[in-house]
Amino acid sequence: MTTLSGSALQAKVLADRPPLRLLLAQRGLDGVTLLVLPAVLFIIALFVYPFLYGLVLSLEPKVGDWLANYRRFFSEPFLYDTIAKTMWLALPSTLVNILISVPVAMRVRLMRRQRLLTTILVLPITLGTVLIAEGLLNYLGPQGWLNRTLVLIGLVSSPVRLVHNYWGVFLSLVVSGFPFTFLLTLSYITGIDASLEQAASTLGANARARFWHIFLPLLAPGLAITFCLSFVQTFSVFPSAVLLGAPAGVTRVISIAAYQAAYEQYDYSMASAIAMIMGFAQLLVVVLVLAARGLFYRGPAGSAKG
Amino acid sequence: MGRETALSDRLWTTAIWALVIFFIVNLFAMVGTVLVNSLGTRWLGTWLPTAFTTKWYASAWNEFQLDQVLVVTFEVVGAVVVLSGALGVPAAYALARREFPGKKLVTLLFLLPLLVPPITFGIPLATVLYRAGLAGSMSGVILANLVPTVPFVILVMIPFIEQIDPRIEAAARVFGAGTARLFLHVLLPLLAPGMLAALLLVLVRTIAMFELTFFTAGPTSQTLVVALYYAVYAAGVRAGQSIDAMAVIYMVTTLVWLLIALRFVNPTQLVTRAKREHAR
């Protein structure tokens, strides 16, 4: 206890009422606690304040009353369609990533040397969405290696169109999202106590029964979190929707609408409104998923230490 | 277990490995296309370019003013790393060592910038920075990039600090060390591995951070990833090979740091923030 220094003790003995400093220290407020202040002030100034500023700004449109921006967003198909288009990209790609991640992670958890594999899978996260978009433009293009291979082995007669449409963006979301989803799923699966599986095995459950009755119920809350975190990433797709998709058509996602309002029409009020709607839409999905999570078993899945 | 299940098990395993290999092959092929294209003279309708050359690197270097872009990138990244360490580590220390009223609220405050994607808070943030006259300059880019990195450093550092025995610090106090000496001679050496890991991850993340830089950068404060985006966006104006040469330069910049980072960090920490600490 560094806080109970000699002078503080003396003061306690001398005075009837302990000094304020000691009272605060008892509640955990002392010099060390103050170290948190610079970071808190920074986040308030550059995260909380801009967010509230954006909220207020969105209620002060260039023309019309305070709800005009929001009314405009929900009355113009060009604008409100972006929500459905974004969902149509984000939900399937997140689901596909989770459906692939679970069986692969179930297998990888048995491996002793996971480091090389996990390292390879970390690559797309650090390469970033811009590089993945540029790479896929080359690779999936009509003359790219993928189409050449497909034609060579006779799967298709002419190159498949995979860029500048829905599939290009979808594939880029899978490539950039899978490593993240996989690593999260793997960390949840390795957190499940192996003795539970052994017990089930001893009692005669085969691999499939062990998965459905032991792993999946324990994994479901973790998968819900994984889904939310991956979904939030895919929902804000921007570079690949512009570069790989059809930014005026099927992949005109909500972040493109926000960007155009801010940097092409210089209507920051509208752009803030779209950003708020975007935040609200993804929050809605996250809340729904987390509410569904409450239906599953919640409790210790690891050993006694948790 | 009967023989039938054993066979279906084996088929299942094979299918899963085939899936993983399929993913990795496509990933490498994607990166490979960029690399090969940047080294080829002309590549139209064949498996490989007709001849190989390195001239695109020179032309990319001149066309995109990469020397200036690289200097800006490293200045931004360096400032972000130093500042997020300076702001984040003390805060993490306080959060790891003290229980105080409102601690849950503070923790939530630090979680939010990581949960809300950069596009959503980037636009209001850029608007505020424009009003303050900071956007379009290097300081605006640095400030915007600090928003997700400071909480990231805090969340990575808390478990590292918690595992250091507080009695070590108490012992140093007993022997008469002041706060400054305690920090320099006791805490810093103990925290160094954790700080190195956290800051290397911040470095890799900042090089790859597109959205926040894109919203706040002006013509003279573009980082490599934003310059790459503009090059791809305006493709057709310039030779595809020199864009890919730039992409390779970008890739090498991230990969070098990633490989250094992976010597100190478990790859899963890149996403789960030291969650697996006990599972290892």
Image (cartoon, coloured by chain):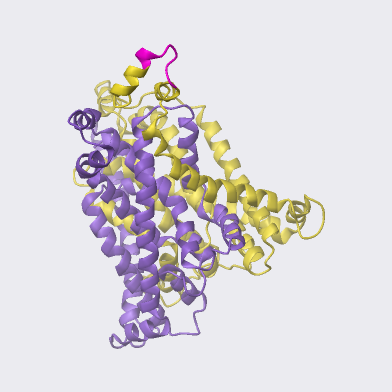
Chain colours: A yellow, B purple
Name the residue located 37 percent from the left edge and 76 percent from the top edge: B246
Where residue B205 sits in the image (x, y, percent)? 38, 57
Q: Which residues are magenta?
A: A12-19
Name the residue located 37 percent from the left edge and 29 percent from the top edge: B98
Relative to the observer, which residue lies in front, A224 or B75?
B75
Relative to the observer, which residue lies in front, A121 or B147?
B147
In the displayed structure, does residue B278 sit left or right of residue A134? left
In the displayed structure, does residue A127 sit left or right of residue A47? left
In the displayed structure, does residue A137 sit left or right of residue B168? right
Q: Inspect the magenta stretch and tell me whether residue A15 lies in it.
A: yes
Name the residue located 59 percent from the left edge and 67 percent from the top edge: A247
For this orientation, the residue located farthest to the top is: A16
Where residue B105 sits in the image (x, y, percent)? 50, 33
> Which of the image's four quarters has the N terminus of chain B?
top left
Quarter where residue B174 is shown: top left
For this orientation, the residue located farthest to the front is: A14
